[in-house]
Amino acid sequence: MMEILAYSYRGDLRDLIYTGHIAVVDAEGKLLYACGDPEKVAFARSSAKPMQAMCAVESGAVDAYGLTEEELALLCASHNGEEMHVNAVRSVLAKAGLDESFLQCGRHAPLYAPAAQALEQAGIPYSEIHCNCSGKHSGMLITAKYLGESLEDYYTRGHNVQKRITRMIGDLCDYDPEKIVLGTDGCGVPVHALPLCRMAYGVARMARPETLPEPRAAYARRITTAMRNHPLMTSGTGRIDEALMTHLPVFAKSGAAGYYIVGLVDRGIGIAVKIDDGSGDVRNMVVVEVLRQLGVINDSNMHYFDAWRRSEVRNHKEELVGYTQPEFQLHKQ
C-alpha cells in the first residue's frame, strides 16, 4: 500500500506526487504510528551504519586500537569528505597499522562543494578516502585486522566481517538474518533489506539500550552517544543529520534512495522512512514533518529546520514557479 507523503506544486496545481512509507515503533516492538506500508521491505542503505558499527565495537577492535569517541562517530558516517573527515579516516587506519590503500569503497568527489573545489584547485585527484563511506569501510578493515581475517576481500558478501554485520542487524531488529535480502551498496559492501517496522524496532532498541542484553546495551549506548556528541563527524557541514543531532535528543542517519532512520533517545522510539522514488529532498522534508507531528520539533526549535521543511521550484531564469512540501498525517495504530 502506497500513500502520498508530499506534493510538488507548479503554480496552484499539484504537479507531482511523492509516495512512501513510515514506521514509528517503540522499544518493546509496538507499532505506534504508520503511513503507507510499515511492512515494506526496503534496503536500509547507509541508515544501517550505526548497526554495522556495533560489530567493530563488539569485536574489540575499537578499544584495542584506541579509537576516540569522535573516530567511533566516523564509523557511522556518510561524510562530506571535508578535511576533518579525511584526517579521521587516516587516523583510524593508522592506529591499526593500515593506510588508505586498503580501502575498497570506490571513489567520488567530496560531497561538500568547497572540499571538492579545494582538491581541484590544488590539482589533487579525489580517491577512496574521500568516498562518503570510507569511515564505515575503515571500521570494517580494523575489525578484520584485529581478528586476523583477510583484508583484500573484507567488503565481499562471504567475508566474516559482512556475515557478522548481517547477523547483528537481524539480532537488533529481532528479524531472522536468513530473511534479510542482500544486495550490493554503492560502496561495494552488502546492503540489507528488511521490513521498515523491524528496522524501526532495532533503532528504538538502540535509542533505549537497556532493552538490549549486555554487553550490547553498552555498545549501542557508546555508538549513539558518539554520534550525538560529534554530529559533524557523522555527516558534515550543512547536512540534516548534523542539524537534528545538534538541536534534538535524537540520533539520526540518512540513507541513499530515500531512506532515513531516527532514534528518540528520551522516549525509546525508532522511526524509519522510505520514499518510493528515492528523493533525498522529499525524504528530509518528511522526516522533519514526522518529528513535528510527534512533538519533537515545535515552535521553539522549528527555525533550525527551515531549510528542510519545503523546497522551492524555480525555472531556468531562477524565477519562483512552485514549491514542494510534505502533506500527510501519521496514523495512530
Image (tube, helix red, strand yellow):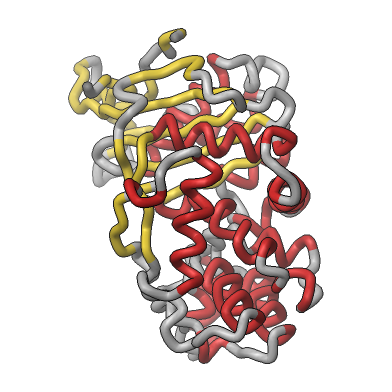
- Picture quadrant of residue 5: top left
Residue 250, visible in the rendered structure: no
User: In the depicted view, which residue is nearer to us: 316 or 231?
Assistant: 231
Q: Residue at x 63, y 78 (%)?
A: 142
- Residue 155: give x, y in percent of width and height: 42, 75
Question: In the visual, does 279 lie left or right of 260?
Answer: left
Number of marks drawn: 0
Look at the image and tell me in which quarter the C terminus lies.
Answer: top left
Residue 150, visible in the rendered structure: yes
User: In the depicted view, which residue is nearer to us: 52 or 5?
Assistant: 52
Q: Residue at x 45, y 88 (%)?
A: 152
Q: Residue at x 24, y 21 (%)?
A: 11
Question: In the visual, does 223 lie left or right of 199?
Answer: right
Question: In the visual, does 168 lie left or right of 14?
Answer: right
Look at the image and tell me in which quarter the N terminus lies.
Answer: top left
Q: Is residue 60 above or below residue 179?
A: below
- Residue 282: give x, y in percent of width and height: 37, 35
Q: Residue at x 51, y 30 (%)?
A: 271
- Picture quadrant of residue 66: bottom right
- List the single residue furthest toward the top: 332
User: In the depicted view, which residue is nearer to us: 107 or 76?
Assistant: 76
User: In the depicted view, which residue is nearer to us: 74 or 292?
Assistant: 74
- Residue 286: give x, y in percent of width and height: 43, 28
Question: In the visual, does 121 lie left or right of 6?
Answer: right
- Residue 132: give x, y in percent of width and height: 49, 66
